[in-house]
Image (cartoon, rainbow, N blue to C red):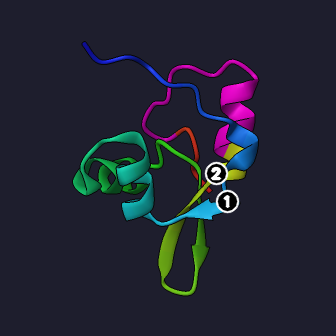
């Protein structure tokens, strides 16, 4: 049986690559890429790449956000 583990949000780096996040939360890179393209999770553009803004994501999770939908993070 699989057990859920707690994650200390304050220990996250300020940004993560899409691949890093996929490994961290156990989903495919294609899933994370879809979330990024649909602006479902917060991102920051560095150069030509989009990275996950883990600070904003952690803030939203800490404040009780549980549902993330397409367009939540339009710029």
Residue 54, how many percent across, how many down? 64, 51
Q: Nearer the viewer, residue 19 or 32?
A: 19
**Residue in the foreground of this view, choosing between 28 and 23:** 23
Residue 13, numbered label: 1
Q: Could you say where residue 6 lies in the image, as x and y percent from the top left?
A: 57, 25
SS for dot 1: loop
**Pointer 1 and pointer 2: residues touching (CB < 8 Å)?**
yes
Total marks drawn?
A: 2
Of marks 1 and 2, the one in the foreground:
1
**In the image: residue 29, left or right of residue 50:** left
Residue drawn where x is 58% and y is 73% of the image: 45
Residue 65: % across, % down: 63, 22
Question: Quick check: 57 left or right of 30?
Answer: right
Relative to 75, does residue 69 appear above or below in the rendering?
above
Residue 45: which disc?
none
Q: In 3D space, how far apart are the residues under numbered discs 1 and 2 (Cα atoms)?
A: 7 Å
| Mark 2, other Cα within 10 Å: few <14 / some 14–19 / many ≥20 | many
The quarter holding residue 9 reads: top right
47 lies above or below 58: below
Q: Quadrant of the N terminus?
A: top left
Q: Quadrant of the C terminus?
A: bottom right
- The range drawn in magenta is 57-71
Q: Residues within 10 Å of mark 1 (few under 14, many from 20)?
A: few
Furthest residue in direction bottom, as rendered: 47
Is residue 68 located in the magenta-colored stretch of the structure? yes
Q: Is residue 22 left or right of residue 9?
A: left
Look at mark 2 in the image and give the residue it sits on. 54
Predominant SS along the magenta part = loop
Identify the mark nearer the N-term, 1 or 2.
1
Is 34 situated above or below 40? below
Left or right of 8, for residue 66: left
């Amino acid at each position: 049986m699989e057990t859920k583990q707690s994650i200390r949000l304050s220990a996250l780096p300020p940004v993560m690559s899409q691949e890093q996040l996929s490994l961290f939360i156990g989903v495919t890179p294609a899933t994370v890429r879809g979330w990024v393209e649909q602006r479902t999770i917060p991102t920051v553009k560095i150069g030509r790449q989009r990275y996950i803004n883990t600070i904003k994501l952690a803030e939203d999770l800490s404040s009780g956000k549980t549902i993330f939908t397409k367009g939540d993070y339009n710029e």
